[in-house]
Amino acid sequence: MEVGTQNIAKLEPFLLMSKGAKGAAAAKLIQDATTAPGVFVFAELLEQPNIQELSGHEQHNRFYSLLQLFSYKTYPDYLQYKDALPPLNEAQITKLKQLTLVSLAQDRRILPYDQLLRDLEMPTIRDLEDLIIDAIYLDIVKGKLDQREQQFEIEYTMGRDLEPGKLEQLLVSLQNWASTTSAILATLDDKLSEISNRTATSKKYKEAYEKQYQATLKEVVDKQKEQRNANKPPVYTGRTGLTAAGRAELANQRAREEAEQREREKAQRKEAEEDKDSMDVDEPTDSKGKGRKPSVSDSSQGQQRKRNRV
């Protein structure tokens, strides 16, 4: 069973009694409802005709204000208007502090201990944590106590009654939220469409590039094969395709070429030998010594005769 259903079920007996309660009885009914354990919503009781009559009753109108306090106000509001309200017992004070915790949790996800100690007038952190733990067990709020960071992390909170005039503000806020959400969704749709188009274009470009790349690569490989085949020497397989007469003629031609080559080599060797023999023959000289070079002794004797003349 959900929290709202549980609260309505626990409020049901007070709704039935309010139909016959007037004046002091209605005031006593409010006192009992705000004290009763597990009752945390009071909007339906506040709307009952007999309860509404208390707002104009001089003696009991403060009980109507008390019911308003528990419906949608907080503990700091009680401290501010304490003199205009009936005194609260311990159970009412604890419940009002728990409802204040719910209101604070609706505005912020993280509630520092310092703020809670101040707003709830809790004397110690231990008392504050006990209050929060009780609220968690009552299922009006869920979260985690972070003693290291000294804070209460909110995960879930029940909804409180709306103050008159707040419904219109809530509707405006929801409309603004809906408009903002629609604008964000439209922007996201545009972005997704743009990304999709860009992805499709990129895919086409990649496919065209890959196709061109493969074609170019194939062309290069084919050219390399052609170059290798062109530079490769022909392989003699022993088969010329000639007839027997053709092969005989080819053999005779090779024999003639070899004979001519031998003749040329023989002639070259003979010519070389003749040149060598001609170089070994001495030049002839006459008997009178014509062409003979004077010896060293003759030269020295001539020089001696010249000195004697002097």
Image (cartoon, rainbow, N blue to C red):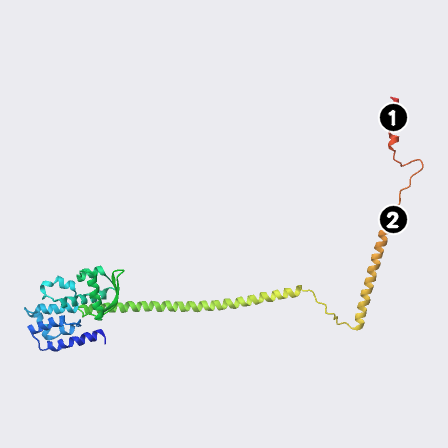
Q: Residue 51 at what x, y percent from top left?
A: 10, 73
Few, some or many C-alpha atoms within 10 Å of disc 2 (few <14, some 14-19, many ≥20)? Answer: few
Give, as a three-letter code, the residue at label 1.
Answer: Gln
| Quarter occupied by residue 163 | bottom left
Q: Which residue is mark 2?
A: 277
Nearest the camera: 134 or 158?
Answer: 134
Nearest the camera: 261 or 11?
Answer: 11
Q: CA distance from mark 2 to mark 1?
A: 45 Å
Q: Is residue 275 above or below residue 136?
A: above
Secondary element at tag 2:
helix
> In the rendered image, is residue 64 in sight?
yes
Quadrant that contains the N terminus: bottom left
> In the rendered image, is residue 171 in sight?
no
- Asked if the residues shown at circle 2 and circle 1 are in contact, with their CB atoms under 8 angstroms apart, the answer is no
Residue at point 84%, 54% (across, down): 269
Q: Residue 216 at what x, y percent from top left?
A: 55, 66
Residue at point 22%, 70% (across, down): 137
Q: How many marks?
A: 2
Secondary element at tag 1:
helix
Q: In the displayed image of the protein, which residue is found farthest to the right?
A: 287
Q: Residue 187 at what x, y percent from top left?
A: 34, 67
Q: Which residue is mark 1?
A: 304
Q: Residue 69 at what x, y percent from top left?
A: 14, 67
Residue at point 46%, 68% (across, down): 203
Give, as a three-letter code, the residue at label 2.
Answer: Asp
Quadrant that contains the C terminus: top right
| Quarter occupied by residue 65 | bottom left
| Quarter occupied by residue 50 | bottom left
Q: In the displayed image of the protein, which residue is found farthest to the top?
A: 310
| Residue 14 as seen in the image, left or right of residue 229 | left
Nearer-N-terminus badge (2/1): 2
Nearest the camera: 247 or 55?
Answer: 55
